[in-house]
Amino acid sequence: MESAAVPAPSSGKAPAPPIPSSGEKGLKKNAIGFVSSVVIGVASTAPGYSLAATLGFIAAAVALQSPAILLISFVPMFLVAAGYYYMNKADPDCGTSFSWVTKAMGPQLGWITGWTIVVADVIVMANLAQIAGLYTFLLVGWDSAAASTVAVTAVGVLWIVLMTAIVLIGIELSARTQVGLLAAEIATLALFAVVALVKVYAGDAPAGSIDPSISWLNPFSLSPSEISAGMLLAVFIYWGWDTTATVNEETENPDEAPGRATVVSTLILLGIYVVVAVAAQAYAGVDRLVENQEEVLSALGTEVFGSPLDKLLIIAVLSSAAASTQTTILPTARTTLSMARSQAMPKSLGKVHPRFLTPHVSTIAMGVASIVWYVGLTLVSEDILFDSLAALGLMISLYIGLTGFACAIYYRRELFRSVKNFFFVGLGPLLGGVILFYLLIKNGIELADPANSESGNSWFGVGPPLLIAAFFLVLGVLLMLVQWRAVPAFFRRRPEAAPAGFLEGEAQLEPVPIARSGEGGG
Amino acid sequence: MAEIVVGYDGSDCGKAALDEALRLGQSLGEGIVVVFGYAPPGIWGGEIAEHAEAIEELGARVLEEARARAEAAGAEVAVEMVPKKPAEALAEVAEAREARMIVVGSYGDPPLKGAILGSTPNKLLHIAGFPVLVVPALG
């Protein structure tokens, strides 16, 4: 049914037999097994790195309720992921937010969605590089270098260069390597949690430790402002998980299995996050998590494990950061490639390298933008680097929220055909989008207060994170207008809707009249 | 009649391989099959279909180039685009067509660079069930 909906790609004049040559058939080879699907879901999210980068900030926002925040933050992500799943049925073989929002809500919002993905990935690369640089020195025990901004930034830049090169050459970590890396990462985090909790109960933990309480998991004791502040940080921690919904799973039982990998990876992620958060908080108390918010896991690992096992946790975070490379640069480079091919961005971004067959112009542009952003911000102020992390939450909620809306809008003629459609295709993604937009607005208002930013600075009377996000939004609109004027074809596209009966296999999509290369470039 | 299978990617070493295959085909009175192999884009999220289309457009253009070059040389030519890594694609086409041999170009990378960037001739030597001729890049 999925394949019936695809307009056959006109891939050229190469004769097909005896070996299939169409892209569609080629892509089907990507259908993957259950274990790989789970691994992609969990590895894309990079749990070790996400925890190291976020746990301290969440503790600062909601004190003892961090585990509760981690639990409820998952809800909007889960709801929107249903939207990913259904949009993937209309635009199979892994289109993502840019294609879907363009399809459902028109080219202008689609453009802004693609732009937001790019900006979010540039910003997260800077934070990823910061963590990778810091943990590299912590791994070799060179503490004076770890304390030096120049040294950490230099190594961080090297990490970005290395990561960009790996994606450029097209080396993909094999699924098997990922399984190994991820297993090591999860085992280390689990070991950390167990040892920390044993020490807490045995009374070996340092002063300030607290016995875990079931109340930590209770979201109802949070104030609305704590919920929005905490969730905006924690939404980031699940960022990447949504891609599981678009992975085509190879299966003999196609009705049940595609959801199974998603459910299992969900349980693994929720489990890791909640257990590690509870253990870290019980061992060190909230204050020390907040004090060490820039490197929570390495700070605690040394105490909990003792030398030399403390290196394990550092390796877990480093390998997590490295493994998430491909899930940061590669998809973003593909988004700009896709935008360029739809004439929504300059044509050169749509080129593929003749030897490596990767989107090399897009990839290099991503790497360079990340380095400029990272080094630029570090020169201005390191606090602003962390402020940009808060801005990141705004961007992620914007584009994932839009994707949730896109699903409900695109399938509007389907929603009342069955109860299942109404809840999973319509209400769920819509509600997820509404929650994310509520967080976006609520947090935007809070971030407007300069006192709520890391730097405490006030730019034009507004907090830096909000201004960073607003700056990029305005820049995006300006660039869109430039492209619109130069190459208007893409912006003439009309929103589409799935015909009633499509999901039931009773109706087919009309072929999409996409403006393709040929006339004029940008 | 056997055929000569040749790998072509539009690069200088691809051209060297193609020209060598054309010369051999002429001497032996045999046709050539030009192959463009590409591994389908990986599974790590993003707009995979668009990426695949971009690669296929590149492949179609490159194969047309090769066809024109071969026809100008008066050779009998077929082209194939195979969604597999280049070495596997060449071995598979040779197998299916019971080719006389496989001709492939070499970038002339030093061994370490070849190991990092991926060396099609090196892989091909290990998996091909047919004779392999490696042609260094022009110049």
Image: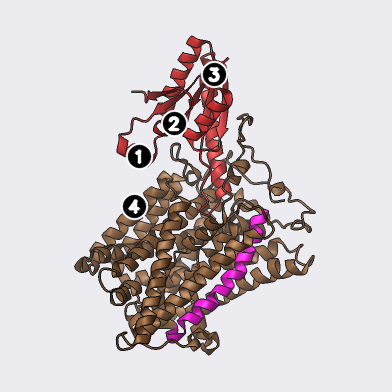
- Residue wearing tag 2: B124
- Which label is found at residue B3? 3
| Real-space Cα separation, disc 4 to disc 1, in angstroms | 19 Å
Specify whether residue A71 is painted magenta. yes
The reply to whether residue A462 is in sight is no
Q: Are marks 3 and 1 on the same chain?
A: yes
At mark 1, the secondary structure is: helix
For the residues tagged 4 and 3, is the chain the same? no
Q: Pointers 4 and 1 in contact (CB under 8 A)?
A: no
Give, as a three-letter code, the residue at label 2.
Leu
What label does residue A463 carry, if any?
none
- Of badges 4 and 2, nearer the viewer stands 2
Question: Is B134 located above or below residue A519 in the figure?
Answer: above
Q: Nearer the viewer, mark 4 or mark 1?
A: 1
Instruction: For marks 2 and 3, give the CA distance.
Output: 18 Å
Give the drawing colour for chain B: red
Q: Which mark is residue A161?
A: 4
Pointer 3 or 1: first along the chain = 3
| Marks 4 & 2 on one chain | no
Residue type pointed to by label 4: Val
Q: Which chain hosts label 2?
A: B
Mark positioned earlier in the residue sequence (2 or 3):
3
- The C terminus of chain B appears in which quarter of the rendering? top left
- The span from disc 2 to disc 1 (Cα, nearest Å) is 14 Å
The span picked out in magenta is A62-90
In the rendered structure, does residue A86 fall within the stretch colored magenta? yes
Q: Position of residue A514 (x, y in %)?
A: 64, 46
A385 horizontally vs A275: left or right: left
The three-letter code of the residue at mark 1 reads Ala
Question: Which residue does the numbered mark 1 point to in the structure image?
Answer: B115
